[in-house]
Every structure is written in structure tokens, then in C-alpha cells.
Image: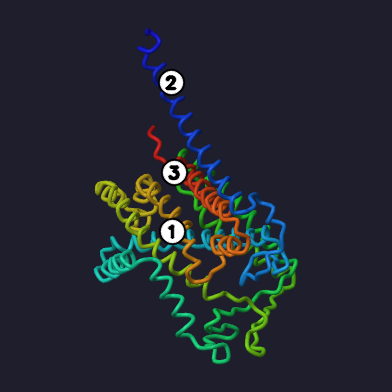
Amino acid sequence: MRFWNDRKNRAIIYQLLSLIAVMALGLFFYSNTKANLEKQNIATGFHFFNRVAGFEISESLIEYNSEDSYLRALKVGVLNTLKVSIIGNILAVILGVFIGVCRLSKNWPLAKLAQGYIETIRNIPLLLQLFFWYALFTEILPGVRQALNPMPGVYLSNRGVMLPSLEYNPVFFYMGVSVIFTIILGYFLKRYAKKVQDQSGKQFPHVLYTVLVLLFLPLLIWLVGGMPLEFNLPKLQGFNFSGGVSISPEFISLLLGLVLYTSAFIAEIVRSGIQSVKKGQEEAAKALGLKSYLVLTLVILPQALRVIIPPLTSQLLNLTKNSSLAVAIAYPDFVNIANTTMNQTGQAIELISLIILVYLSFSLLTSLFMNWFNKKMALVER
């Protein structure tokens, strides 16, 4: 009796009973599913991965054709989802911060324009926006033979956007190495600038020096390497273009829809974060003689980040998960390719489990990065 009266002992017993109940429920669902699959003569497992997929994929970051396996096709889907998610999140944050700051501008037309954008975009369903952008490219733009040519080497048609591609030269590798070196140099210059400011109160222009090195070091390497600059221009041959880089209407429509929709929510997050900073902070910064952009970047935004980052994380996760709507406009993301694989193989449970696992992994990795960033940006009291 004394054992049962102890609160900790009761808590352990309740947790064990709950665990046993969950395991029993999981075992029931597993055995029931296995029995039903055997009754319908449906094989289980991931043996289908090595079978020939037999279908084409319109765009891929890696080499792929219909003779490749289902596993490679699913890899293409994962990479396509990653591509639109990473690019979309970066562009959405940039646009959202810009619109959020404009929303608080003292310029009345600019503030009202930003407000109108936010209220309009947020209240139109994302799926409807995707249909709008897709119809804009496929129905309004002309065919390939009548493609618009706004500037040399650039063509707009209902098959997407054709752009010139830069021919690779070994000099470009060294230019890329110089960029990485400059980023590392900028990190150490920033640390040095902070040390100088803490010790003497003087500001060291580390941003200016980093930008100058970033501009002139790759340029110097390019000049020494013989100034290689050759473009592969797209040319109309038959019923399509050859050469250059093609950006499909599906990718552009999906990216535009996700970026515009998510940036409207991010703009409101930025606005609320900025307004959460006490008015006296701005007044004190202006009293010290700081210019408006320095007040925003050095005083307001660093304090607003502690309010902005948690809901911003949710919006980044939403953009990645909303990318699964790509199936509505035929963009070959992971869900689209997994659905095609499911229809051909009948392995519904395995593929749905894979979809859950892939998006769960994306979400956990994003949350892990944003939690690290939030901890990095947290205000530390002295």
C-alpha cells in the first residue's frame, strides 16, 4: 500500500500501462494490415525499388530516364522538392522582411501598398494562386514559334522561360574558391570589428572590406585567367528550343505562388516583431545621431528577432509542406513521383510512409537549424 501511495511510483506505472496500450494498438493495426494485404495477394516491402520505373520526369537535377529504377525516380522527387523549398524559403524571407518594413513606412502610399499586398495575398487560397500563375504561363503566353523575346537570348513562351547558359571554364572554379575564402574572411573580420568596438568604441568597416574583396578578388582571378565568358544561347529548332537553360512553367508557377503567399505572412510577423520593440529604443538611437537604416539594422531588428524567429520557423515549415501542392500543376516533386510509383506498383503503405518520413525529415532539419539560429540571436543580459 505504501508503494501505491508514492506519486512517483504511480506515475511510472501509468506510463508503463500507457506504453503497453500503445504498443498493443500498434500491433493490432500491423497484424490487421498484414492479414488484409495477404488476403488480396499484395506484396509488402521495398523490393520494388530496383525495378524499372518506366516513366519520364520532365525536369531533374540528376541524370534520369525511363529505364532507371523507382529508387532513382524517388531521388529525383526529393531533390526537386528540396530545390523549390530552399529557393522559396530564401526568397520568401527576403520579400517578407522588405514588405514588413514597408508596412511600417512613414511614406503613406508605400505603407498602404504593402498593406494591400498582405491583405490580398493572405486571403486568396494558395491552390487558387498556383492555378492562376500556371494559367498565366500556359494559356496567355504565346507558343514556342511566337515566343516573346524581351532581350537577346531570353525567350518567354507557354513552355517556360529560356535563358542563356554560361559555358564552364576552369577559371570559374577558382573564382568560386575565392568567394568561399571571402566569406570566411568576412566572418573573422566581423569578430575583429566586434573586438575593436568593445575595446575602443570605434567601428571597423568590416562589411565594406568584405564586399570589396568579394567584388574584386573574383574579378582579378577572371582577368588573370584570360576573361573567359562564353554563353550557350537558346535557339529555336523545329518545335522547341535547344541550348541555354529552360525553366519550366510548372516550377515558376509553384515558386511564385509559394513565395508570394508565404511572404505575406512573414511580412506580418516582421511588422509585429518590430512593433514589439519599445518606442524609446528608436528614440534613443536617433538621439545618438544614428541614421534611419542604422537604427533599423543595429537597434530595432536585433531586438525584434526574438519575437520574429519562432513564428518565422512555422512559415518556413509551411512553405516546404505546401510544396506538395505541386501535384496540382504537374511539377514533379516527391509527392507527385511517389503517387505515380504508387499507381504502378500498388505499394501504397510503403510509399505513404516514405512521404511522411521525407517531409518529417525536412521539418525536423528546418526546426533544428532555426532553433540554433534562435539561440544564436537571443539577447544575452550582462
Residue occupying image coordinates x 38% and y 34%: 381
> Which amino acid type is marked by label 1?
Val
> Which amino acid type is marked by label 3?
Asn
Compared to residue 379, the image places residue 279 above or below, namely: below
Residue 374: which disc? 3
For label 1, the residue is: 93
Measure how far apart labels 1 and 2 are at the Cα level. 47 Å
For label 2, the residue is: 13
Residue 216 occupies quadrant? bottom right
| Residue 291, horizontal then vertical, whole percent | 34, 57
The residue closer to the viewer here, 221 or 110, is 110
> Which amino acid type is marked by label 2?
Ile
| Residue 366, horizontal then vertical, whole percent | 50, 49
Residue projecting furthest to the front: 39
Residue occupying image coordinates x 68% and y 68%: 54
| Residue 260, horizontal then vertical, whole percent | 40, 66
Is 377 left, or right, of 190 in this rendering? left
